[in-house]
Every structure is written in C-alpha cells, then in structure tokens.
C-alpha cells in the first residue's frame, strides 16, 4: 500500500509524482496524462480537489479550484483598479473557457482572445 511521497506509472502511460495515502493520490502532486496534459495541485482520495493548475500540451492553462476532478469556480489574473479588472487581464471561466485581453471597469472592452475549452 502506497503512503507518503512517491511515483507511480500506470500501464496506460499515466504517471503521478507526489503524496499518497492508503494507495490514493492524496496531498500535493503532479499527474501526467498520456495526451500531454499535466495537473499539479491538491489531491483528495485520488481526485483533483482543491487548488491546482492544468496545463495542456499547447500551453493553455486553467489555474484555479477543482472538485472531484472538475474545474470549480472562476479566476482572474492581471491588472486591477479599485478591485475591478482594468487593463490587460486573463479570465478563466468555470466551464474551461478563457478570455485574455482588455478590460475597462470590470467589463471586456477592446481587443482580446476568447479560447473555448474545446479548442475553438
């Protein structure tokens, strides 16, 4: 039974490096998917739960909350003015879409790039 720090590689090519508890990924660790994705963050009993970063093979990222292997919540990073997005910001929607571009008074304005979770 795996407990503590370790590395495990499945026959499918999946690989996990991090903390284990009672044979589950549990604590902080990095999971490498065969399709090139990588998740680094919190784990609870084998599920991505807590704060983490999913990086796709093309460089796209979701940085934020996870619950039972699903993105959970929305997150922003960038420039703010009086607590509101203002300037260049990235906004990560809970459904996996993200928008990076100009914001004025907490609203998308000007030029930006919207990326849908399915790659469109």
Image: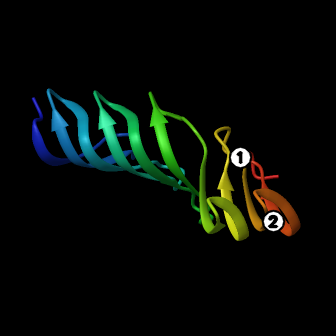
Instruction: Identify the element where label 2 is drawn.
Output: strand
Question: What residue did someone put label 1 on?
Answer: 117
Residue 82, image x, y percentages: 64, 63
- Compared across the picture, whether 9 is left or right of 112 comes to left
Label annotation for residue 104: 2
Q: Residues within 10 Å of mark 1 (few under 14, many from 20)?
A: few
Residue 30, image x, y percentages: 33, 52
Instruction: Identify the element where label 1 is drawn.
Output: loop
Q: How is the image coloured?
A: rainbow
Label annotation for residue 62: none
Q: Which one is nearer the viewer's eye here, 31 or 28?
A: 28
102 vs 72: above or below: below
Residue 45, image x, y percentages: 28, 27
Q: Please give the name of the residue rendered at 32% of the width and 37% of the height, measured from the top-left corner.
A: 43
Residue 98, image x, y percentages: 71, 53
Q: Which one is nearer the viewer's eye here, 91 or 116?
A: 91
Q: Earlier in the sequence, mark 2 or mark 1?
A: 2
Q: Please give the name of the residue rendered at 39% of the width and 45% of the height, measured from the top-left corner.
A: 14
Screen quadrant of the N terminus = top left
Q: Which one is nearer the viewer's eye here, 63 or 78?
A: 78
């Amino acid at each position: 039974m795996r407990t503590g720090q370790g590395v495990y590689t499945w026959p499918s090519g999946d690989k996990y490096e991090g903390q284990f508890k009672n044979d589950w990924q549990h604590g902080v660790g990095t999971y490498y998917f065969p399709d090139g994705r990588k998740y680094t963050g919190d784990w609870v009993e084998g599920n991505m739960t807590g704060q983490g970063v999913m990086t796709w093979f093309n460089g796209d990222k979701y940085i934020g909350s996870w619950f039972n292997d699903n993105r959970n919540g929305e997150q922003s990073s960038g420039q703010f003015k009086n607590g509101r997005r203002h300037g260049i910001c990235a906004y990560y929607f809970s459904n996996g879409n993200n928008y990076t571009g100009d914001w004025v008074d907490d609203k998308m304005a000007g030029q930006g790039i919207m990326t849908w979770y399915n790659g469109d």
